[in-house]
């Protein structure tokens, strides 16, 4: 049975004819565009034909529409971010959408002269409005630098991501966008009771899992974040089991075992494949990975990431997966990377921003580079006024709001997933704590002291809490003889390098890639051995996206389909 994931597309048109045309386009969407099987079904349609909602995938009885204040709420999306508002008086319906502060459940908007299309899948909105092949150079430029889009850009021009903490209402084909809630939650002064408030928010976020029909499984490591979720689940009285992936001698496995024992948890450990089996079967497997990465991530993550394959099949009672994704929000996001031993450095913040956002600027052609740099104006201006707060905000808006959003959609296709650190109440409570306390791990330790202080006595894996000396009591490190599986994405040999080189150049010619990036610069970067393997994977993913080859993601790949490698 497929997971309960489904996608939603809502239409608000100025005329009956425009609404009908868009419904037909949505129903006729090429199934290769979507990562789960269709066909789409109309979930609700107004009597005047101008407003409609369609769902792609299995929308079972577990997804119930929730009433709004004084209104009926129907045909809601999987995450509840898109719905139709029906007035009590019996109006024809209004398209509504809302994003959270971290917007990890994304909403995409595409406008035409006589309609607005709102969806939780950018490619579906692009396909319905005829923009699937109209690629955005600004998104391509950002993707090359960071491996994910920035701000509102998507792979498709004139399909934009709704901002964080925003509300949209659309009727008669015109959208109105407003702030969903006042303030970002961040305060620069001291906030009494910061750790207790974050602790209470975390417990609030996980408490509904106590009513989950499926078991709850926590991905437990030896770090700071998953143990906080373990503490919150324990404080909320939610039954759960723990799972860790790694060799028995790995610090994550050792420390996770100590946490599980202290909390009395059932703890399972799965070992990585042996080193000899860690490499991909062949180049056909890598080609399939490139195509699948684009399809599953809506064109917004590199194939360097492990996002899986389309059409996954899971058991009916698949565990609800919980994890520490987003814990960096409690540590100041990118601001912590610009601090040393908890000391904040504006110069380091500025340099980190420059390296993150412009490290591969030389690969871009002048027009694309100029448009991309112009898109960086707002965060760059914020950096000038407050570099560390700007990095904190940049992480929330982009790393959480774009990278995590794309990854979350891919993971949700495989299994139910809960990420408590992204819950609105947790983000707001955390950002109300002074940045210095977050960067210095004071907030993390304070929350843990509130929820489960005995976990403070268990060491961390690999590195200690900020400001603490590295001792045998504070850190568990890897034993010298411990086995490690090679990361084939970074250490591939000459044959794989030749394949990636050939694929990038050949597929790049069949789309607009070399109108955006400099081919001579790409050829220099691809000279072997590849010094920047992440950039190579990013370019290969872009080649799959821009050439349209990603639409073949479900096709079986044989050796004959694989482009010849370049010497």
Image: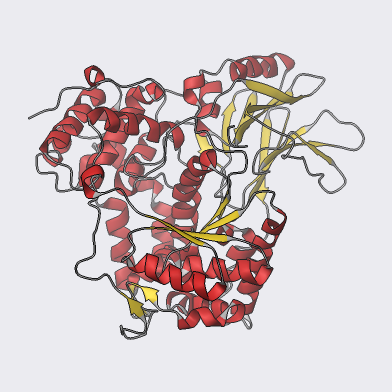
Quadrant into which the C terminus falls: top left
Q: Tell which residue pokes out farthest to the left in this image.
A: 567
Residue 299 vertical position relative to residue 511 in the rendered view, above or below: below
Is residue 533 shown left or right of residue 425? left
Q: Quadrant of residue 428?
A: bottom right
The residue at the point 84 percent across, 49 percent down is: 69
Please state the horizontal and vertical placement of residue 510, each as a whole percent of the image: 27, 20
Q: Quadrant of residue 211?
A: bottom right
Is residue 163 shown left or right of residue 539? right
Is residue 389 shown left or right of residue 560? right
Please state the horizontal and vertical placement of residue 80, each as a whole percent of the image: 68, 43
Residue 60 vertical position relative to residue 362 in the rendered view, above or below: above
Residue 361 visible in rendering: no
Quadrant into which the N terminus falls: top right
Please state the horizontal and vertical placement of residue 493, each as a whole percent of the image: 13, 41
Q: How many marks?
A: 0
The residue at the point 51 percent across, 27 percent down is: 34
Which of these two is toward me, 42 or 128?
42
Which of these two is toward me, 217 or 354?
217
Which of these two is toward me, 558 or 376?
558
Please state the horizontal and vertical placement of residue 387, each as a whole percent of the image: 39, 68
Residue 252 visible in rendering: yes
Q: Quadrant of residue 65?
A: top right
């Amino acid at each position: 049975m497929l997971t309960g994931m489904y996608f939603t597309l809502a239409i608000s048109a100025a005329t009956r004819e425009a609404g009908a045309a868009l419904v037909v386009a949505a129903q006729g969407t090429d199934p290769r565009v979507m990562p789960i099987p269709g066909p789409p079904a109309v979930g609700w349609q107004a009597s005047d034909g101008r407003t409609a909602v369609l769902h792609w995938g299995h929308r079972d009885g577990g997804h119930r529409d929730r009433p709004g204040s004084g209104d009926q709420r129907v045909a809601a999306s999987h995450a509840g971010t898109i719905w139709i508002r029906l007035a009590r008086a019996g109006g024809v319906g209004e398209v509504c959408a809302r994003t959270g502060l971290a917007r990890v459940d994304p909403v995409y908007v595409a406008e035409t002269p006589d309609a607005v299309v709102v969806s939780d899948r950018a490619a579906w909105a692009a396909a319905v409005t005829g923009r699937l092949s109209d690629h955005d150079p600004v998104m391509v430029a950002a993707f090359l630098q960071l491996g994910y889009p920035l701000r509102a850009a998507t792979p498709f021009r004139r399909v934009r991501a709704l901002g964080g903490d925003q509300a949209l209402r659309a009727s008669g084909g015109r959208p109105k966008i407003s702030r969903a809630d006042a303030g970002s939650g961040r305060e620069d002064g001291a906030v009494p009771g910061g750790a207790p408030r974050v602790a209470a928010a975390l417990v609030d976020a996980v408490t509904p899992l106590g009513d989950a029909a499926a078991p709850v499984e926590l991905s437990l490591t030896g770090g700071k974040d998953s143990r906080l979720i373990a503490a919150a689940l324990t404080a909320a009285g939610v039954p759960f089991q723990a799972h860790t992936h790694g060799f028995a001698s790995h610090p994550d496995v050792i420390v996770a075992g100590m946490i599980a024992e202290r909390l009395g948890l059932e703890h399972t450990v799965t070992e990585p494949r042996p080193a000899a089996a860690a490499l991909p079967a062949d180049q056909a497997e890598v080609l399939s990975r490139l195509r699948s990465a684009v399809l599953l991530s809506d064109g917004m993550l590199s194939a360097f990431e492990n996002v899986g394959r389309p059409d996954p099949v899971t058991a009916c009672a698949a565990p609800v997966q919980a994890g520490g994704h987003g814990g960096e929000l409690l540590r100041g996001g990118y601001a912590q990377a610009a601090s040393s031993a908890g000391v904040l450095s504006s110069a380091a913040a500025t340099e980190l921003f420059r390296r993150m956002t412009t490290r591969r600027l030389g690969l871009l052609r002048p027009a694309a580079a100029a448009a991309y740099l112009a898109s960086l104006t707002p965060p760059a201006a914020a950096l000038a006024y407050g570099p560390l707060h700007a990095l904190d905000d940049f992480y929330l808006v982009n790393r959480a709001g774009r990278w995590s959003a794309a990854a979350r959609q891919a993971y949700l296709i495989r299994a139910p997933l809960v990420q408590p650190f992204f819950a609105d109440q947790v983000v707001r409570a955390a950002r109300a704590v002074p940045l210095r306390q977050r960067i210095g791990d004071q907030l993390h330790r304070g929350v843990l002291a509130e929820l489960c202080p005995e976990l403070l006595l268990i060491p961390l894996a690999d590195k200690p809490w900020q400001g603490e000396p590295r001792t045998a009591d504070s850190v568990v490190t890897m034993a010298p003889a411990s086995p490690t599986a090679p990361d084939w994405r970074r250490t591939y040999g000459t044959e794989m390098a030749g394949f990636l080189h050939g694929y990038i150049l050949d597929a790049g010619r069949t789309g607009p890639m070399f109108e955006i990036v400099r081919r001579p610069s790409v050829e220099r970067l691809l000279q072997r051995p590849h010094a920047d393997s992440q950039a190579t994977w990013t370019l290969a993913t872009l080649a799959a996206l821009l050439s349209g080859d990603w639409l073949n993601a479900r096709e079986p790949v044989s050796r004959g389909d694989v482009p010849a490698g370049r010497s």
